[in-house]
Image (cartoon, grey):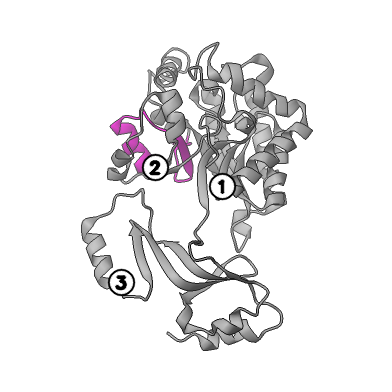
Amino acid sequence: SNNSGFFSTLTNASDEPFRWVFHGNIIIPTGNPLHAPDPKEQQQEAAAAPEEKDVIWIGPGLMLCRCHVLCVDQDGIIEHISHQDTMNITDLKKRRNYVRLGKYEFLCPGFIDLHIHAPQFAYTGTATDRPLMGEDGWLETYTFPAEKSLGDDLRKAKHVYRGVVQTTLATGTTTACYYGTLHLEPCKVLVEVCLEQGQRALVGKVCMDRNAPPDYLQDTTQNVKETKTLIKYIHKRAGKEEDSTRLPLVLPVVTPRFIPTCTPELMKKLGQLAKDYHCHVQTHISESKDEVQFSKQLDFAQDGGGGRTDAEILDSHCLLTSRCILAHGVFCSGLELDLCRDRGAAIAHCPLSNFFFAGSALSTKRLMQRKIKVGLGTDVAGGDHPS
């Protein structure tokens, strides 16, 4: 349709009502490519979709709009997109905020990294020579010391966090779900860096009250107290989701590291905290065979659960919700996956770290067939690349 009336505001106003005007190839997602499509729904959608000039379907749920113009308002909201033939391009080119994309360039939505450990960025691409668990495992040898060092030196924390945020932004990640450290203050630094750099983020204080080095461990009460403090800090700095007309740039996320390092008491209180503050939850699930076995042993011998699965344990503490992001899930049983689906939880698929530590691949087709929400995560530094 003709948009001359709409664009008269754009082309004649002196107060720049739009922050950006992009002209060229625009990629638009219409669905999640990691969800199994229904053939009948696809046929119906294709039959109902009007033919548009210079629109090419390049994959499931993904279309390329060639020779289009996309307008973004002052709040960063996409206000309009249409073919270049519907507007006065000569006038558009005169504006300060006009961006002409090259012939082989395209504008696309930013990537969302569903699982990344910000403090581990310093040794990305190294230290994959050990199994995940055990006294001489990857966590004990590399991860815990690296994370603890940021609590000891906040200047170092700021340096590392600026590095990870700037690097992920440079590789196209505009939203990241960050695991911070056990200590509160470095987590606040990460929040400030995300706000400073303009990256949308979920930031969580990692919680552990067992099976970790004595100098990198907190009791249950301190874990809960500092998690609550971080939630309130983020709300104060970025705003509350329920009080904002648009989504705050940074959101809090309740973060029990994983079952082996969290007692039932801690998980129960974190589940209540997530409910009270309407927070997201992130944790690891069925990442490796040794983790799965250890979790079952703990549940049977210490926690009084009789040897339940990871999903059953998390669900019993109200952590398995529609706002829960579960990393890995390589060794989840069919019953566990069904439970995750019924609760609306999502799986963060981390193919690189699965290769290094799980020794197996996650069957995303299996998840798609069960209608489970699934996305991608780098799992830095378990994954050796920040994109």
Q: Quadrant of residue 351?
A: top left
Q: Would residue 261 appear left or right of 62 to someone viewing this image? A: right
First to last magenta residue range: 318-341
Decide whether residue 332 is among the magenta residues: yes
**Three-letter code, disc 3:** Ala
> Callout 2: 10 Å neighbours few (<14), some, many (20+)?
some
Give the mark, 1 or 3, whose residue is nearer the N terminus: 3
Q: Quadrant of residue 47?
A: bottom left
x, y percentage for residue 49? 30, 72
Q: Which is more foreground, mark 1 or mark 2? A: 1
Q: Quadrant of residue 182?
A: top right
Q: From where the camera sits, is residue 229 visible?
A: no
Q: Residue at x 51, y 34 (%)?
A: 379
Give 251 or 262, whichever is nearer the viewer. 251
Question: From mark 1 to mark 2, how far is it between C-alphas?
Answer: 32 Å
Q: Residue at x 33, y 56 (%)?
A: 60
Instruction: Provide the residue designation for mark 2.
Output: 343
Instruction: Provide the residue designation for mark 1.
Output: 171
